Image (spheres, rainbow, N blue to C red):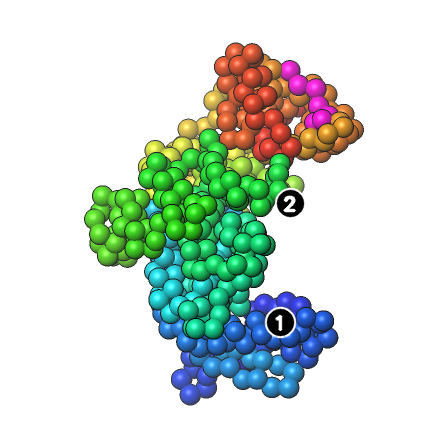
């Protein structure tokens, strides 16, 4: 054993090495002794042994391999392939959502893995980004290599004895026949994985769940199977078509995996699936990491303010950005390191760079622009317009709370550029709003036009939990 990689209530994952050839593995050690104290130990034990049995039978480059297992009195040790790169879910959250080329590359790999799993008469039953691991070692910038993991909820079917009958998995990814307990009791098959595949694609492209349980119970939303796309994150028509072809109420109406891989969104203008994969894997890598050096020795307050502003920038441009201490030419400095996604156009990159430079200028007033790791006497990017210098502002996001008794608890006044906050009442409480804030978008829709039109747009999207973008002027 070399080091601990992670731990939970009953299991620990460690890095280990095989002495004869120094090959590294991940060992998942499950505390069976602790599990025995649980009233449902028998079910938990069956789940563990099911995962061992299924993983032992699967050998595919899109699936995490199980090489060995050792069961003792108190522990079950699973010796598995070491996959370092975290969950796909974390990669989506980090940048808000994927561009279509990035999502397409991941989607193809998931479909490849599912095809193999189904060919072995296995229903995955828990397909979600949290169970998809990123293989960082084999990934290239902008192109994530992935592997499917966690087969504890999977079920071997068509073995002459069993069928999938229980409600397992994660509700946001449940197909209608799993969501409905009466329907689930009648049994279901691999078609449930096709529904989940559609939800995963939606989450990658939109950065939200298609069915989230807000406003009405999630099982009602799932039964309706009506997929809507927010204005600010609407994919191309081909992508929408593929998602809707997978998220179908009728299991037999869902697009099968062969037709998914032949779908126009997957093949695009590049031709066949193999040609698409070949084009991705052998294309010259793009230079995507762009460092922006911050001036001087930033204070904690300046870093905190910049980090808050970066959250909005990341969400808007779907690009990663982190604040890091780095050495350059033997001098240690602080950088904002921006990572542009594959598929972001050059025009979008230019605008994103300009806005990022604006954020740095706003948080570090009076300093020369810094880009590419060197301090420049004059910025190579356009600086803040004069009117913005006179009245600088910060862009923030806020989730609106609306209660049945107190409403939103704010007094708003429409104007040409948005809804101005005139008063914030104690109930239900809007800690993210301040008087004179200007709400410039709601639910991804810009509030533009005459005051009457702005008020009308705001009213159409007004609801509990809606996302607002706020412009807060420096006062």
Q: Nearer the viewer, residue 60 or 193?
A: 193
Determine which residue is flagged by label 2.
300
**Residue 243, image x, y percentages:** 40, 44
Residue 73 magenta? no
At a point 55% along the width and 41% down the height, the residue shown is: 221
Q: Residue furthest right?
A: 426
Residue drawn where x is 51% and y is 52% of the image: 177
Relative to 357, 77 lies left or right = right
Question: Which residue shows up at 42% across the image and 59% down it?
Answer: 190
* Residue located beneath label 1 in the image: 44
The image shows a total of numbered marks equal to 2
Q: Residues within 10 Å of mark 2 (few under 14, many from 20)?
A: few
Residue closer to the observer: 217 or 442 = 217
Range drawn in magenta = 407-413
Q: Give residue 31's quadrant in the image.
A: bottom right
160 or 392, nearer to the observer: 160
Question: Do the numbered discs 1 and 2 sit on residues whose CB atoms are within 8 Å?
Answer: no
Cα separation, mark 1 vs mark 2, equals 46 Å
Q: Compared to 80, does 431 lie above or below?
A: above
Rendered location of residue 28, percent (x, y): 55, 74
Q: Going by the image, does 172 lie left or right of 378?
A: right
Badge 1 marks a residue whose secondary structure is helix
Q: Residues within 10 Å of mark 1 (few under 14, many from 20)?
A: some
The image quarter containing residue 421 is top right
Mark 2 residue element? helix
Residue at left 58%, top 46%? Answer: 219
Point out the frontmost of discs 1 and 2.
1
């Amino acid at each position: 054993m070399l080091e601990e990689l992670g731990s939970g209530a009953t299991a620990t994952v460690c890095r280990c090495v095989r002495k004869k050839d120094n090959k590294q593995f991940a060992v998942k050690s499950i505390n069976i002794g602790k599990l025995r104290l649980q009233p449902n130990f028998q079910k938990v034990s069956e789940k563990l042994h099911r995962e061992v049995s299924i993983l032992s039978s699967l050998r595919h480059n899109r699936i995490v391999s199980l090489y060995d297992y050792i069961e003792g009195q108190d522990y079950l040790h699973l010796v598995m392939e070491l996959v370092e790169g975290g969950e796909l879910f974390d990669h989506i959250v980090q940048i808000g959502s994927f561009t279509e080329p990035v999502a397409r590359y991941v989607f193809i790999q998931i479909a490849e893995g599912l095809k193999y799993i189904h060919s072995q008469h296995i229903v995955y039953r828990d397909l979600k980004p949290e169970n998809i691991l990123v293989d960082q070692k084999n990934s290239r910038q902008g192109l994530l290599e992935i592997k499917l993991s966690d087969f504890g909820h999977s079920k071997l079917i068509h073995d002459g004895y069993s069928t999938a009958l229980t409600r397992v998995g994660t509700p946001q990814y449940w197909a209608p026949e799993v969501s409905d307990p009466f329907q689930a009791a009648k049994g279901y098959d691999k078609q449930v994985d096709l529904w989940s595949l559609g939800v995963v694609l939606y989450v990658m492209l939109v950065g939200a769940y298609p069915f989230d349980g807000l406003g009405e119970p999630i099982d009602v939303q799932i039964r309706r199977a009506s997929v809507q796309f927010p204005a600010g994150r609407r994919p191309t028509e081909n992508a929408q078509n593929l998602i809707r072809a997978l998220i179908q109420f009728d299991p037999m109406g869902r697009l099968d995996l062969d037709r998914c891989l032949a779908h126009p969104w997957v093949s695009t203008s590049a031709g066949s699936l193999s040609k698409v994969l070949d084009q991705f894997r052998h294309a010259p890598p793009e230079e995507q990491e762009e460092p922006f050096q911050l001036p001087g020795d930033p204070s904690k307050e300046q870093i905190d303010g910049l980090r808050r502003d970066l959250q909005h920038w990341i969400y808007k441009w779907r690009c990663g950005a982190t604040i890091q201490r780095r050495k350059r030419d033997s001098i240690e400095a602080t950088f904002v390191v921006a990572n542009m996604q594959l598929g972001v156009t050059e025009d979008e990159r230019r605008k994103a760079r300009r806005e990022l430079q604006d954020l740095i200028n706003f948080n570090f007033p009076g300093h020369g622009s810094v880009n590419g790791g060197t301090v420049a006497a004059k910025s190579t990017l356009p600086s803040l317009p004069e009117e913005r210098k006179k009245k600088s502002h910060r862009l923030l996001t806020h989730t609106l709370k609306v209660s049945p008794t107190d409403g939103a608890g704010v007094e708003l006044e429409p104007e040409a550029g948005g809804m101005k906050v005139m008063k914030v009442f104690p109930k239900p409480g809007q800690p993210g709003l301040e008087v004179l804030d200007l709400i410039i978008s709601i639910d991804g829709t810009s509030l533009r036009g005459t005051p009457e039109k702005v008020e009308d747009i705001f009213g159409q999207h007004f609801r509990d939990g809606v996302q607002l973008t706020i412009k807060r002027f420096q006062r």
